[in-house]
Amino acid sequence: MKTVVLAEKPSVGRDIAKVMKCTKQGNGFFEGSTYIVTWALGHLIELEDPSRYDAKYKTWALEDLPMLPETLKTTVMKKTRRQYETVKAQLNRKDVNEIVIATDAGREGELVARWILKQARVKKPIKRLWISSVTDQAIRNGFTQLKPGKRFEPLYKSAVARAEADWYVGLNATRALTTKFNAQLSSGRVQTPTLEMIRMKDDEIKHFKPQPYYTIEAVLPNGLKLTWTNEQHQTRIYKKETYERLIAQLKDAPLTIQQVSEKSKKQFAPQLYDLTELQRDANRIFGFSGKETLQLMQRLYERHKVLTYPRTDSRVISSDIVPTLQDRIRAHSGNGYQSIAKQLVGKTFTLPKSIVNDQAVSDHHAIIPTEQSVDATQLDNRERKIYDLVVQRFFAVLMDPYVYDEMTIQATVKGEMFQAKTNHVTKLGWKAVYESTPSSPSRTRQKVAPDQVFSNLNMTGSKHLTEPPAHFTEGTLLAAMENPVRYMTGHDGALTNSIKKAGGLGTVATRADIIEKLLNTQLVEKKGKALHVTSKGRQLLELVPADLKSPELTADWEQKLNQIAEGELSKEAFIKEIKAYTKTIVLNIKAKETTFKHDNITGTQCPECGKLMLEIKNKHGKKLVCQDRACGYKKNIARNTNARCPNCHKRMQLRGEGKGQMFTCVCGHRESLAAFERRKREREKQKVSKRDIHKYLKQDDGFENNALADAFLKLKEKQKKL
């Protein structure tokens, strides 16, 4: 008898098949003497469309809401039905007596597998593979420690409860808003509070009034700068009269050193990365979107197998990882990290709870390098950037602390206090990881002593203005979604604790998609890196019920979903509450008397109904859409393409229809579709075919130990693998 292993994606399925010696390849599966490995393509199963419960739901009508089927059914997704049939056939084979769920180890991964098993009506015993990396060693270890499937049934119920709650609330709220106001409006328990946070930030900046303040600085002849401070150690002077009096009083007066103290201080490296912190840094440093960072992490995890599971909210590792640290250090000692790794190889680590903490690890530990090495030339430019962030942070936490001497100098000028602080590095420690070139610690000291008097001071005053808070970027918004307490108005302590325990709005795996959806539905727009709420977004926030805008709803949901996962609350009780809440929000929307005003209306009339059309911009391009949803007429204006401009090499847009289509570029280049296709054909003729490469490689040109020869040899070996 055999065991079917169900993975979440083909790449992971192939990795498991290789380790478990499943060498016979079928259509959508691998088979060996003991195991059959097959896979989903993400979700293969979804909740039924409303129209499957009642024919009247095929059309959107306000009077038909709310939609509250007694129970929600699942169905096979049309676009992946073929793979589902393959998986189903393997699961129901007569020579199979056991199933191993090997989907991603988390709530959503459990749902992917269990819905497939339910849809295929599989009743066979289940075991669970729970691993955080897909290296060969991690897979082998995981199969020696398979967990009973029954242990994860509450997690599955929690996942189903989340999916069904989002169906009831999300679909009903979206249909109610859209039909009531005849505009494409969507709302959700994570999406709408996130939008509200952006609006609050925008309004905070809009209503900010700059306030002038002054500072005074005394520069000694040796260049040391001291700043005026009051008794509360504040350096800002907000009253102009006080500032002018002090400047007049202190001008040309001598400065006396009162005290010089020095203290040795340590600074430890930042904690390891979880997904949100990695997305924040990648956005801040490289301008990557949250979704882009997650996609790059997935490739480094699945394809290259050099980093551990990305969808984690833990910033520490568990104690069982500690014995593997040396293997991980050695595996990544190349790629420019030789000198750092040399300091760590063979070292015995005594790590604090900020790094190793079994109690603080959730489903997965922090993102760290695996025990598998990589040739960095195999990574593309963006993958290398994410790889470096994780490897550098990993090495940094294992290094000694950064040590410096902080010198505090206190002085007086006519009774007024002045202070300076200078730092002198004594041990670079973990900061050496981030040094592009090695540097020696600074040991320079300012030569001042108590009771020393300085004349001929350069006493200067400066006027400043307080600055408004910065707009959200994707990175800072991800951080706010993780901890949205500041944006919860009138909240109580219990809900605050609940949102903290729940990990904020959404999950580490879904937050980037939420931001992407807000941008694609024109509720939010990006100006540079800054995110701004649009007119459409502001209007939506005026139309949705108040509690749909607050993080408190998600806090309450996540608290109850966690209780379901722990077996402390029944799924049925939770869904009963959700249905009652759905009725309330639909009634609330129906009772609204306001109207929605389109801010993207054009002067172009719809050829079908004569109403003015709307201009819609999204990541795919630009199109005109009739403002009347019942009409539904659409016309493309411009489509974003992967075609590159021959002048500036940026991606071009394709405008127009039929033979008159024209490629346009932001640099001003214009080219007809016919001309572009001719240019493309000419370029392809100049390309060297694989056959020509093979023919050339077989030739003996009589050169040896040559760089060019080595390059061709590597190319030949690479092609053999393909």
Image (cartoon, helix red, strand yellow):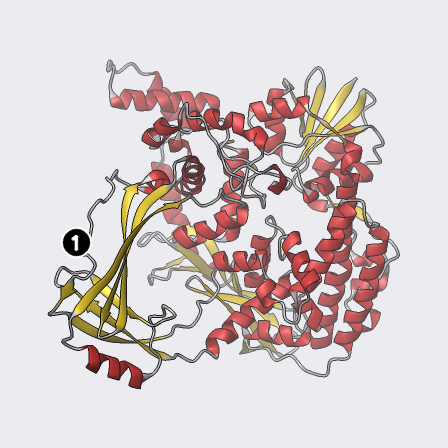
x, y percent for residue 364: 61, 39
Instruction: Answer with the quarter of the image where residue 711 lies.
Output: top left
x, y percent for residue 565: 76, 45
Residue located 44% across and 69% down the image: 469
At numbered mark 1, what does the secondary structure look like: helix, strand or loop?
A: loop
- The reply, left or right, for residue 375 in relation to residue 28 is left
Instruction: Answer with the quarter of the image where residue 545 lies.
Output: bottom right
- The reply, left or right, for residue 244 in relation to residue 254 is right
Instruction: Please identify the quadrant where the N terminus is shown.
Output: top right
Instruction: Answer with the quarter of the image where residue 697 lies.
Output: top left
- The reply, left or right, for residue 615 in relation to residue 660 is right
> Is residue 702 placed above or below 111 in the rendered structure?
above
Q: Which residue is mark 1?
A: 447
- The reply, left or right, for residue 1 in relation to residue 694 is right
Q: Residue 186: tell me if it is visible.
A: yes
Q: Amino acid at mark 1?
A: Lys
- Judged from this view, the residue extending furthest toward the front is 451
Which of the two residues, 228 or 575, is positioned nearer the viewer here? 228
Mark 1 surroundings within 10 Å by alpha-carbon count, few (fewer than 14), some (14 through 19), many (20 or more): few
Residue located 36% across and 35% down the image: 687
Residue located 18% across and 68% down the image: 255
- Judged from this view, the residue extending furthest toward the bottom is 241
Q: How many marks?
A: 1
Which of the two residues, 607 or 44, is positioned nearer the viewer here? 44
Residue located 34% across and 29% down the image: 338
Which of the two residues, 372 or 248, is positioned nearer the viewer here? 248
x, y percent for residue 326: 46, 25
Q: Residue 661: tell me if it is visible.
A: no
